Every structure is written in structure tokens, then in C-alpha cells.
Amino acid sequence: MPVDYDYFLTCEGHSYSGKSADVSPFGIGIAIDKFVKPTSAVDLRIIVSGVNLRLETKGVIRHCQELSDGGSRPNYRAGIEFIDTPEMGLPLITISDQLSSHNPHHAISVNATVEKCYQLLSDFEKYPKWTTGVSGAKILDRYPDGRARRVQFEYNFYLRKFHYVLVYAYDDQNNTLSWTSEAADDAIVDVKGSYGFKPMSGDRCVATFDLNLTLGFIPSQRLVKFGATIVMRKEMKNFKEFVEKQ
């Protein structure tokens, strides 16, 4: 079903808030009680309360027109263009009682040995240095051999910050690190995934990344495509560059 977005904005020293369903990937239309000069800068926060998603961005007023509603108080309709969202724009959300499952896969060659990649991938506290969106990683407990078992992450994913805990398992024989989710925000129902490494000629290997993500909301196809292709490929490229610099 369509979503009403809650918005909160400041413009020219004034604050406004309300709801709007008039949202596109690149802007939002709102009703306000004061005229706002076109080209005025806007600080904007948009919230989809049904799935607890939030976008904080900046915008610019493109037009502001008075509405005639027969009341004594003038009303205006303002159009705001987002100016610092990604090129693909705001990924619109559809609320649903159903869960959605997504299974992206990607592989890349790395100029490093399997052993080196496997070791560096297990250094979770360095994830913020190479993983886009990860702003924090905290090891909660370890296996008897000292390797991390449970890790808590903070991840900036498009519209909001997610906090989740992953439980890791090590398959040393096959050089595979896998994980399952233990605890997450209500929008993320379940996360399972694995990184695997296979040797190539010389000191090179192939790294593969498989993910099974179950969400408590139905994302737009724009968001699915973005996550399954652009984000995953970028993360693999970041890991490749991180390893090859060590």
C-alpha cells in the first residue's frame, strides 16, 4: 500500500512538520502555512514510521504556490528537490505484512593468498576501514581459540542506521567464514551469509560473497537492485583493495 512519509524540516529559521504521500525518488511536495521563497535551502528529515526508516538530507525549494481553500488562513504547496541523495534517488518503500527475501551473490579475484584474505576478513574491528556503511564493530564474545564468535555492528543503510549482532562460524578446511543473525532491529528479520576463498595460480584467489537477507518490509525494485548489485560489488572491491594494501 502507499506510504505516508512524516517530514520535519527547517527553512529560513522556521520549522515545519507533517505528512506527505507526494514523494518521488528526487523530491517531496508538502503543504505549509507560510510562503517560502524558491531557491531557499532546506534541512529535511523524512521518516517511514511503519518500518522505522529515516532519511536525513538537504534540499532546495523549487516552487511555492498559494492554495485557495476558502479558509481565513493562507495555505501553500511547496515542492522540494533533494540535493544530496545518491544518484539513484530516494528508494521508495511499500509497506506489506509479508516478509521479503533477497539472495545476492558476487565474486572477485584478489591479488593475495587465500590465507591472507581469510585472516583479514576475520579482523572485524577493522571493518569500518573498508566496509561502506559500517560505522562500528564490537566483539561481544570469542571462541576458545580467541577468534570472534558474536559481533555487534552499526550499519548505515540508505535511510537509517541498523544495529545487529552476527554469529560467526569458521570453516578452516574450506577457507569459508559464514554468519547468521542473532539480534537485529525490527526491519531486519534475518541475515545469513558467507565469504569463501579459492586459490588461483600464483598468490591470487577468488573471493565469493553470498547473502540471504530477510526484511520485515517490501523494498522497491530500485532498492533491491541497488543492494544486490552496486552495494555488493562495491563491498567486494573495497575488500580487494584493503587486502592488497596490507
Image (cartoon, rainbow, N blue to C red):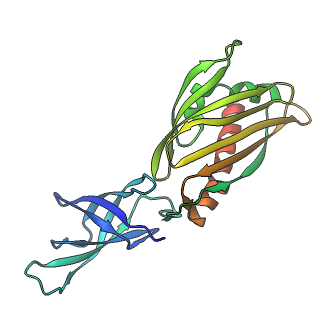
Residue in the foreground of this view, choosing between 100 and 43? 100
Count the marks: how many? 0
Check the image and report above or below for 146 versus 38.
Answer: above
> As drawn, is 209 to the left or to the right of 27?
right
The quarter of the picture where residue 5 lies is: bottom left
Rendered location of residue 93, percent (x, y): 49, 63
Q: From this viewpoint, is residue 213 visible?
A: yes
- At 13% from the left edge and 87% from the top edge, which residue is drawn? 70
Write the residue at 39% across / 69% down. Answer: 27
Q: Residue lying at the far front in this picture: please name it.
A: 97
Front residue of 213 and 223: 213
Q: At which x and y percent is residue 163?
A: 49, 38
Residue at horizontal 59%, vertical 32%?
Answer: 127
Look at the image and tell me in which quarter the C terminus lies: top right
Q: In this view, does 105 lie above or below 63?
A: above
Question: Residue 246, can we see it?
Answer: no
Residue 159 at x, y = what percent? 46, 53
Question: In the displayed image of the protein, which residue is found farthest to the left?
Answer: 72
Q: In this view, does 105 lie to the left or right of 142?
A: right
Q: Where is residue 87 in the image (x, y as percent from the top left)?
A: 51, 62
Q: In this view, does 169 lie to the left or right of 61?
A: right
Q: In the rendered image of this protein, does residue 56 appear above or below residue 40?
A: above
Relative placement, left or right, of 195 versus 75 is right
